[in-house]
Image (tube, helix red, strand yellow):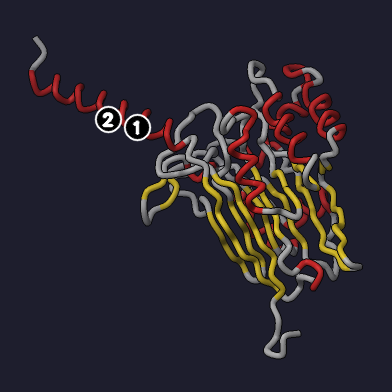
Amino acid sequence: MIPLWIVWIIIIILAAICVVVVVSSYENKRLVVEHYKITSKKIPDAFDDFRIVFLTDLHCNEFGAGNQQLLEKIHQCRPDVVLAGGDMVTSREDVPVDVPLKLMKDLAEEYMVYYADGNHELRLMRNEEIFGLRYKEYIHQLKEFGVHHMSNETIVMEAEGEEISLTAFDLEKKFYDRFQIPEMTYEDMLEDVGEKPERSFNILLAHNPNYFKTYAQWGSDLVLAGHFHGGMIRIPKLGGVISPQFQLFPKYDSGEFHIGDSTMVLSRGLGNHSIKLRLFNQPEISCITLKKQRNEHGN
């Protein structure tokens, strides 16, 4: 006969698991908008109060039928541009891409949309023997909808004769490997995306936040990243518990970070994949406003 104290321990463990499952299920649908204000002297007058909605790590998740809840909150932000930072898909054979495609189509009908790849899109691209032509078909469809797909390139956004630049950086597979964080050098970035554009406020879409130091060294003014899902479980004052590369209490988990004149906005993301767990970690839409820093004379 099992001792009574062991029975009680089993009951307590099962009850705790049930609570975690219920709370996590609630958190996964508790979509919030996080507001950020990025101030810099390099922001041109024409881009003062320019508003960006940054989306990442949807992983085919839906907030209401057809993602209507997500779309409504995006519309409330009144963005000038929507930037998708990768992992909108999930790289599994049994997960279709219909949900992110519909979302991107709906967004492109209202806004200018730029889309950079995360590790899941890149996995589809790099493993045609497993996924066939799914990546090529997905990107083709995005372009048909009017979405600007970017891969290791820089584009210029213009307004009233002034400009800012947007760069998308596709990280090599090794920079997403689990249980290790290989070094990324300035030369690694140069090889893939070239020199930072001169005389321009530069936004960098780089999915993995681990390499913020290198991004800042390269010259990014604003880095937009995701990938970490906020650390899955968030503990007050300690932050996110674990990264997808199995770092415990990673230095970068979510929010705003600074190195010199470079700022990184790290989103908690919109969904998850293999382990569908979120505790004290609501899915995030990042609403970012650019503000020109002026001197005491207002110039």
Q: In the image, what residue occupies the spot 80% across and 55% down?
A: 166
Q: Residue furthest bottom?
A: 297
Q: Is residue 41 above or below residue 217?
A: below
Front residue of this view, candidates 199 and 26: 26
> Quadrant location of the N terminus?
top left
Q: In the rendered image, which residue does mark 1 sit on?
A: 20
Q: Position of residue 154 (x, y in %)?
A: 85, 53
Q: Do the residues labelled 1 and 2 touch (CB within 8 Å)?
A: yes
Q: Which image quadrant for residue 140?
A: top right
Label 2 CA crowd tier, 10 Å (few <14, some 14–19, many 20+): few
Q: In this view, does 116 lie above or below 128?
A: below
- Amino acid type for the residue under numbered disc 2: Ala
Q: In the rendered image, which residue does mark 2 sit on?
A: 16
Front residue of this view, candidates 190 and 84: 84
Label 2: element kind: helix
Q: Position of residue 195 (x, y in %)?
A: 84, 60
> Quadrant location of the C terminus?
bottom right
Front residue of this view, candidates 14 and 259: 14
Q: Position of residue 27 (x, y in %)?
A: 44, 37
Lateral position of residue 141 relative to residue 271, left or right: right
Q: In the image, what residue occupies the spot 72% across and 86% down?
A: 298
Label 1: element kind: helix
- Amino acid type for the residue under numbered disc 1: Val
Q: Is residue 99 above or below residue 286?
A: above
Q: In the image, what residue occupies the spot 74% across and 61% down?
A: 218
Q: In the image, what residue occupies the spot 79% across and 73% down?
A: 45
Q: Residue furthest right?
A: 161
Q: Where is residue 182 in the image (x, y as percent from the top left)?
A: 62, 46
Q: Which image quadrant for residue 248?
A: top left
Front residue of this view, candidates 47 and 122: 47
How far is mark 1 from mark 2, CA to CA?
6 Å
